[in-house]
Image: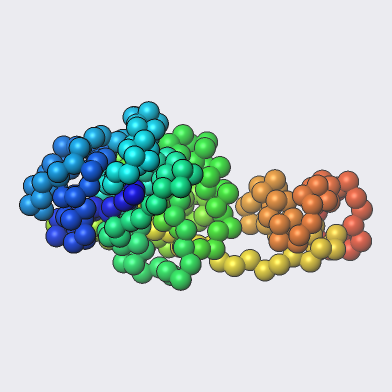
């Protein structure tokens, strides 16, 4: 059996009680950092009786077959990461997928989660949310990811490195507006826990002074957008409205096509004046479009 066990994201006393018994009885304990595991087991007063091996991003691909072999031999393998639940932006997915494919039972020891903790204390809607992990480090890739999330109506949760927090917030403010509500949650459950709430622009200004510790960002989803009628005049009008609001024509075409349920090419042709549109004189088209 493969056991995915959550570990504390801050306070050791938040460790789930089952974690102690699993550490004590597992045949193999696979840990993201064996040194941190030793500190954790010392604090919990438990000594693993099984074999302890490292399992981190650098050796995950090579070590997965070895651990799968142990599972197929009938051993109980416990997987722990430095904090939170394995496989959630941490090592674990490869082994879990391989175990499932091989017919090995997979279970979990539920416990601390930075995603759910940040969501709960953010003050933002929690009825529908999505977890987006870490944003790309390169500016272009980050911008494209944020553009793709522009119409996401669910509350979004991100992980971010402290030294990139300001950059991420400014990119979000540029893509979604400085007034979009967000929360910066750092050092959750720890002594210096802090939750800053406000508009993305305000939060970016705050982060300019430097941010320390583990950071989780929670951002309000986009406001629902009304559907667009599919007749040519309505499609063209919808594109013009979005361009006047500062949206790039390409992005406006994509959004209008999605909302109207029509091919992008149809809206593109209208926006670039390929077709004459009845009633379009009232829309204020540019360049004859």
Q: Is residue 284 left or right of residue 242?
A: right
Residue 116 x/y as whole percent: 35, 62
- Which is nearer the eye, 85 or 170? 85
Question: How many numbered discs, if any?
Answer: 0
Q: Residue at x 46, y 43 (%)?
A: 102
30 up-or-down from 120: above or below: above
Q: Tell me which residue sits at (70%, 47%) in the image.
A: 249
Q: Residue 266: x percent and y percent?
A: 83, 51
Name which residue lies at 11% across and 53% down.
44
At which x and y percent is residue 186? 26, 54
Q: Identify the coloring.
A: rainbow
Q: Is residue 265 left or right of residue 55?
A: right
Q: Nearer the viewer, residue 160 or 71?
A: 71
Across and down, in percent, residue 188 comes to 24, 57
Residue 238 visible here: no
Q: Nearer the viewer, residue 263 or 21?
A: 21
Question: Can see residue 195?
Answer: yes
Left or right side of 5 for 182: right
- Please name whichever residue, 228 or 201, is drawn nearer the observer in this view of the structure: 228
User: As drawn, is 200 to the left or to the right of 237?
Assistant: left
Q: Residue at 45% x, 51% y: name it.
A: 132
């Amino acid at each position: 059996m493969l056991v995915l066990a959550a570990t504390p994201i801050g306070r050791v006393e938040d460790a789930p009680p089952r974690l102690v018994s699993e550490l004590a009885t597992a045949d193999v304990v696979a840990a993201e950092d064996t040194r941190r595991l030793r500190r954790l087991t010392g604090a919990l007063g438990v000594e693993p009786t099984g074999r302890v091996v490292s399992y981190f991003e650098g050796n995950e691909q090579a070590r997965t077959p070895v651990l799968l072999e142990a599972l197929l031999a009938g051993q109980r393998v416990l997987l722990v990461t430095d904090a939170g639940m394995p496989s959630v932006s941490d090592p674990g997915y490869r082994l879990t997928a391989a175990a499932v494919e091989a017919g090995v039972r997979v279970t979990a020891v539920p416990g601390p989660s930075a995603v759910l903790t940040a969501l709960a204390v953010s003050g933002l809607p929690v009825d529908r949310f999505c977890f987006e992990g870490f944003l790309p480090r390169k500016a272009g890739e980050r911008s494209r990811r944020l553009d793709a999330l522009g119409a996401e109506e669910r509350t979004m949760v991100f992980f971010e490195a402290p030294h990139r927090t300001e950059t991420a917030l400014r990119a979000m403010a540029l893509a979604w507006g400085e007034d979009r509500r967000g929360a910066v949650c750092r050092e959750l459950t720890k002594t210096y826990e802090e939750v800053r709430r406000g508009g993305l622009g305000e939060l970016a200004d705050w982060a300019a002074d430097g941010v320390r510790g583990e950071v989780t960002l929670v951002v309000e989803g986009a406001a629902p957008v009304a559907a667009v009628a599919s007749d040519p005049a309505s499609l063209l009008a919808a594109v013009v409205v979005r361009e006047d609001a500062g949206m790039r024509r390409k992005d406006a075409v994509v959004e209008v096509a999605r909302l109207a349920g029509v091919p992008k090419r149809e809206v593109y042709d209208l926006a670039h004046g390929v077709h004459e549109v009845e009633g379009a004189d009232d829309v204020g088209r540019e360049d004859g479009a």
